[in-house]
Image: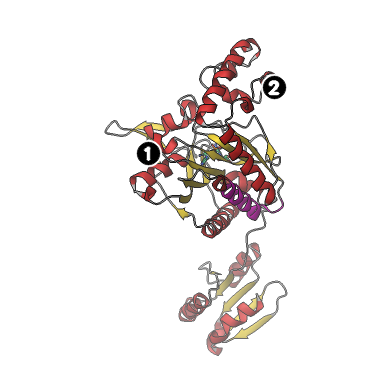
Amino acid sequence: MKTRPVRGTHDIFGENIIKLNSIREIVSKNANIHFYKEINTPIFELTDLFQKPLGEQSDVVLKEMYTFKDRNDENLTLRPEYTTPMIRAAITNNLLNELPLKVYGIGPMFRRERPQKGRYRQFNQINFEIFGSDDYFADVELICIANDVLKNILPDCKIELNINSLGTKKNLLNFKEALSEYFINNKKLLSEESKNKIYNNPLRILDSKNDQDIEIAKNSPSINEFISREAKEHYENVKNSLSSININYTENKNLVRGLDYYCNTVFEFKTNELGSQDTLLGGGRYDGLIDLLGGPDIPGIGWAAGIERISMLMKSNLIKNNEIHLAILDKKFKSQLLKLIQCLKDSQIPYFWNYKYNLKKSLSKANSVKAKKIIIIGEEEYKGNYYTIKNLENSHQDKIKIEEIGKYINDKS
Ligand code: HAM
């Protein structure tokens, strides 16, 4: 049997696990500042939770969900996104009694897409949501958190914020009808993929990457003709607030997002440093979704960011080789070793020992990971009741008593 991973999945280790942990730390710091509470939901849910809310004609539902029958014939799906499970969790745990509810979560999602750079079948998302506010300030707060999180993690990366408003659910319905009509009249010129979307998902033709589709979409009806006065006002307030806190944005009338539940404000943070999978973060309002899932009729807004894509842009010098290596030259020095380990633990000093009882092998391991120091316990140290600490960068070594070790290492590192 040849062991192999499932296509589109990847193991996270070494530098990437350090990056993942550092992303988690930055995310929870930002969440705490704005008082978002963490939620962790199961990775599988009843299929119904996703099918209608994400859109029966959306790519995710049509082609990408991992759905299977449980042994009792129940249809289950590995979560392809986090918004609907979070709403489900808020409803079933009665968390919507006090509004607004601000939550965040980090975890794996599953979509059966064609794997490529930045696109996987199991990937990790950061997710922030606000349930129960239609105030434009909620939009601004979430975009601001997204901006801060990305800036904190990727201070040197050029990232562009695109925003748009899709108007209310009703505005959007009228807009979709007009789009369908326009595309029916221009059907012959559309790509095969877009032809299939004319009736059920005409919005997605607007963000097609096919040159001919792009050309035709240029003269299609614009959401501006359908958007209500209140929706326009909401959008203007969002834009003015962003400008007042110096968050730059580009308005993109073709930004429609891939899931069906969106209306009003939608946004994406993109970079040109990743190739075709260039969206780091996307989100928007989803008024009506909580109601659709059996909760109260309250609005919601949120975003999700792809951890793998962010990780690819992070600097790769995060590994800190600050552990102290140990070289124990004989089994009879075990009691000195145990005392030493207790002392290192008390002083919060990370250490590594390779269980080899061989100076050459321990030194070679320490040098191979560019460790800065090694502590040696040999015959002389044993008899003299001290420890030799060798600086591997300049070969200087000192004889140190156990009581001094913590201070010595912490002072010199
Ligand atoms: P989404 O645009 O489908 O939105 O995904 C958000 C982000 O997840 C993308 O911008 C991308 O960085 C990452 N992502 C998506 N698919 C993959 C993949 N196959 N491989 C790697 N990364 C991927 C949502 O999921 C919405 N639930 C966001 C949201 C939250 N809207 C409101 N609240």
Q: Residue at x 60, y 23 (%)?
A: 205
Q: Tell me: residue 69, above or below residue 344.
A: above
The one of 262 and 281 positioned closer to us in this rendering = 262
x and y percent of residue 310 in the render? 62, 47
What is the chief secondary structure element of the magenta stretch? helix
Q: Is residue 240 shown in magenta?
A: no
Residue underneath mark 1: 45
Q: Residue furthest left?
A: 72
In the rendered structure, which disc, 2 or 1, sits on the residue that comes first in sequence?
1
Q: Residue at x 48, y 42 (%)?
A: 300
x and y percent of residue 242 in the render? 66, 47
The crowd level at tag 1 (other Cα within 10 Å; few <14, some 14-19, many 20+) is: some
Is residue 347 among the parts visible in the rendering? yes
Quadrant of the frame with the C terminus: bottom right
Q: Tell me: residue 136, above or below residue 345.
A: above
Residue underneath mark 2: 218
Q: Secondary structure at mark 2?
A: loop
* Kind of residue at badge 1: Glu
* Kind of residue at badge 2: Lys
Q: Which mark is residue 95?
A: none
Q: Disc 2 versus disc 1: distance between alpha carbons? A: 40 Å
| Viewer-nearest of discs 2 and 1 | 2
x and y percent of residue 292 in the render? 40, 34
Q: Quadrant of residue 183?
A: top right
The one of 333 and 234 positioned closer to us in this rendering = 234
Of the four image quadrants, the one with ligand 1 is top right
Q: Identify the magenta region.
A: 140-156
